[in-house]
Image (spheres, rainbow, N blue to C red):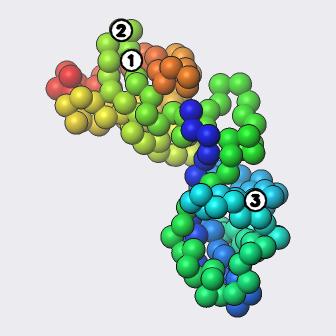
Amino acid sequence: MKEYFDIGIVAGVQGIQGEIKVYPYSHDPANLTKQPFFLIGDKKMAVRSARLQGKFIIIDFEKITSRNEAERLKGAVLQIPRSSATPLANRQYYMEDIIGCSVYEKDIFLGVVCDIIETGSNDVYAIETENNHEILIPAIKSVIISIDTIEKKIEVILPEGLVDNEYF
């Protein structure tokens, strides 16, 4: 499992005092405004203040004091340690733990989760097969039987007609 989670990307700067504007990857960006620090590359950056502004998080780092310094961070990915992430309920998983899992129906290897599509009602796992095809599997209880993020293995029962034999 990954020790750090990517939580957003620096989209730009805010004002002239060195604040950065972050586009969050999180479902609940308000939680990110409470983080005492973020990692950017291998640097631990202490947060002076953070607030939501529309779809962005505005962060004022202690060591960034000018617009020029802040502009150098544009495009950088912010991370937090797994221990700082919001705890999940039973049968909930961090996306980063799902991506890369091998997917099986009974003992038949279907492929590897390469992406997760958020549809609003339920997620959809994009599975890349060995033949470089893509299978889209709804992440619902009747399809996803088990997820083991330690073993990186997902067991599924595919709905009839979801996949043609050309994929295997």
**What residue is shown with label 3?**
37
Residue 28: where, in percent of width, then height? 71, 52
**In the image, is residue 149 above or below residue 57?**
above
Question: Residue 53, can we see it?
Answer: no
Q: Residue at x 57, y 74 (%)?
A: 73
**In the image, is residue 16 above or below residue 131?**
below
Residue 107 disc label: 2
**What residue is shown with label 1?**
104
The three-letter code of the residue at mark 1 reads: Tyr
The three-letter code of the residue at mark 3 reads: Phe
Inter-mark Cα distance, 3 to 2:
44 Å
Residue 10 disc label: none
Inter-mark Cα distance, 1 to 2:
6 Å
In this rendering, position of residue 85 left or right of residue 11: right
Do callouts 1 and 2 mark residues in contact (Cβ within 8 Å)?
yes
- The extreme left residue here reads 166
